[in-house]
Image (cartoon, rainbow, N blue to C red):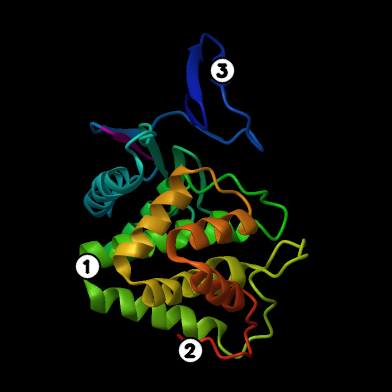
Amino acid sequence: PWHGVANGSVARLPTGVRVINEEASLDIAFTLAPAFHTTQFENFTLYDLRETHGGIDRLTGAASFCIDHLNARYGARDALPNAHFVIHRRAESAYNRRSYITLTDITETDDERLTQFVCHELAHHWSVGANFNTVENWLNESFAEYAGNMALRDRFGEDAFIERMGRYLSRIEDQDLPPIWVPGATDRRPYLVNYRAGPVALWHLESWLGRPTFQTFMTRYMTEGIDTTPDLLAMLEDLAGEEARNWFQARLAMTGTDGWQSR
């Protein structure tokens, strides 16, 4: 008689549970347990596997903020579904499968980190279409990561955002990293490119375009089903002109030793 939470709906059976995925998925992601400490909210549910429930208030605040923040920007035609957050006892391996999000023990996790992580994972509702096993995966991860950092900026202010971007720069500067994307590239990029160099490049583009135009750029990416870099560059040219396209294409071609501080 265990309970289940999954990427998909869960039906209780006399002998267990049935997980029903109505959308194609790379895997069947689920958590089964004799019991959860369950807290239901309007747009999400928390399932806590820990005996103590440290950090629940911070997670509740982050989830509420992120859902409102992201839906206001990207959810006019396709709002976020009800989300399921599972908090595990383990210290590693959190992940997201659309509205099913697992977290490690959040007892010591601060508000800023929780907000950025939760907003990143929820942003994958829209930032998900690129082929994950190719160079184009940078779109999925870099845009979700930067959406999380934009949310962090809106909630905690400019100083918190700049401090986080500074930490990203410190991770990637002088590293022997490949370019984020160049014409003809096919290989999936490493973690530091997709989760650090890509968001920094988007930060630089935001500085180059100005925030109002960049927000339109983000919204169009999230809502128009753009899943390749050539299509992204074409959209940018349509929005801001050929000069913007050429500047950003050159920025994507930079390597870790080219000077990430350039803006």
- Pointer 3 or 1: first along the chain: 3
Q: Which residue is drawn at 62% across and 81% down?
A: 254
Element at label 1: helix
Which residue is label 3 attached to?
Answer: 18
> How far is the residue under mark 2 from the one under mark 1?
24 Å
* Front one among 50 and 11: 11
Residue 24 lies in what quarter of the image?
top right
- Pointer 2 or 1: first along the chain: 1
Outermost residue toward the top?
A: 14
Which residue is label 2 attached to?
Answer: 261
256 displayed left or right of 44: right
Which residue is label 1 attached to?
Answer: 156
> How far is the residue under mark 3 from the one under mark 1?
41 Å
Q: Position of residue 197 (x, y in %)?
A: 55, 74
Name the amino acid, label 2. Answer: Gln
Q: Where is residue 4 in the image (x, y as percent from the top left)?
A: 48, 27
Where is 174 relative to 190, above or below? below
Q: Residue at x 62, y 49 (%)?
A: 130
Label 3 Cα neighbours within 10 Å, binned few <14 / some 14-19 / many ≥20: some
Element at label 3: strand
Q: Position of residue 46 (x, y in %)?
A: 33, 38
Please provide the residue range marked out in magenta. Answer: 43-48
